[in-house]
Amino acid sequence: MSSAEAPYDPPTPDANDRSAAEAFARLLAIMRRLRDPKTGCPWDQVQTFDTIAPYTIEEAYEVADAVARQDWDSLKDELGDLLLQVVYHARLAEERGLFDTAAVASAIADKMVRRHPHVFGDPSAGTQGTDSEAWERQKAEERAARALRGVLAGVPNALPALTRALKLSKRAAYVGFDWPDAQEVLEKLAEETEELKAEIAAGAASYRLAEEIGDMLFVQVNLARKLGLDPEACLRAANAKFERRFQAVEQALAVKGKIPSEARLDEMERLWAEIKRSEASSPGP
């Protein structure tokens, strides 16, 4: 019997599962009450998929931020906010007769079972459910079943640009369209840098400069991928570092009775260098 034909061995809910089911049922009831056209909340009554979607994206970022800060109390709250978004969209769909929350939960449960046959089916499947190639193959089959043709089909346009670039390049790499190693990506980055320099020197139009900078960013995403890093996380860390150091510069200037707009560039650069050296000499986490 193949892993695809292997019988599904469903897990048995434990006490925590039952408690979660009760809490989730309460949340569904609250959402139904909020959306009630007669007795609900006026704000919730008028919401649509389009008006709620931006909040969904925002809440996902807040979850990622809580994880990055390792703020576990906040993570609990942010996960609740994100769960509310799922319930909200599902309720909107149910009202339109499209699907309901149970269908959403069943769909993702079925997908997890399908993608982990070594856990829920044939033990002889080994670890293929966690193997990246098998995972990508399974996703490709699912895209084909939904009539999404082409290697790059189905990568959402609404993703942050760095994340979308990473997903696109992973898809291309899966079929062999990739640099052999990180060194060759670095060489490509140097090539793109020279092209940008040439465009700047030639006084190129802004759209040409934007194109070259976009090429550089795309190559940098691939460099991160080749090094096993998430480019979005790398940039978030760089943002946090810049914010931390600039705030330290502001504090150092405040001691002198100044604000940044009153300080000379060389003065701020000197303070920046001092803060950087101080961080380098401090023990790591």
Image: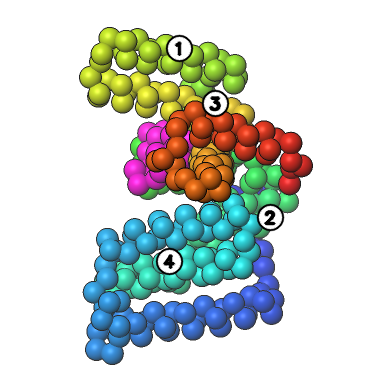
Residue 9, compared with residue 191, is above or below; it is below
> Closer to the camera, 90 or 238?
238
Residue lying at the far right of the rendered structure: 283
Q: Position of residue 242 (x, y in %)?
A: 52, 40
Q: Nearer the viewer, mark 3 or mark 4?
A: 3
Choose the circle earlier in sequence order: 2 or 1.
2
- Residue at (44% x, 70% y) in the render: 84
Identified by mark 4, the residue type is Val
Q: Which residues are magenta?
A: 150-169
Left or right relative to 243: residue 199: left
The residue that mark 2 highlights is 119
Choose the circle earlier in sequence order: 4 or 2.
4
Q: Position of residue 197 (x, y in %)?
A: 38, 13
Identified by mark 1, the residue type is Glu
The residue that mark 4 highlights is 86
Left or right relative to 33: residue 163: right
Crowding at mark 2 (Cα within 10 Å: few <14, some 14-19, many 20+) = many
The residue that mark 3 highlights is 223
The residue that mark 1 highlights is 191
Choose the circle earlier in sequence order: 3 or 2.
2
> Closer to the camera, 252 or 55?
252
The secondary element bearing badge 3 is classed as helix
Q: Is residue 156 magenta?
A: yes
The secondary element bearing badge 1 is classed as helix
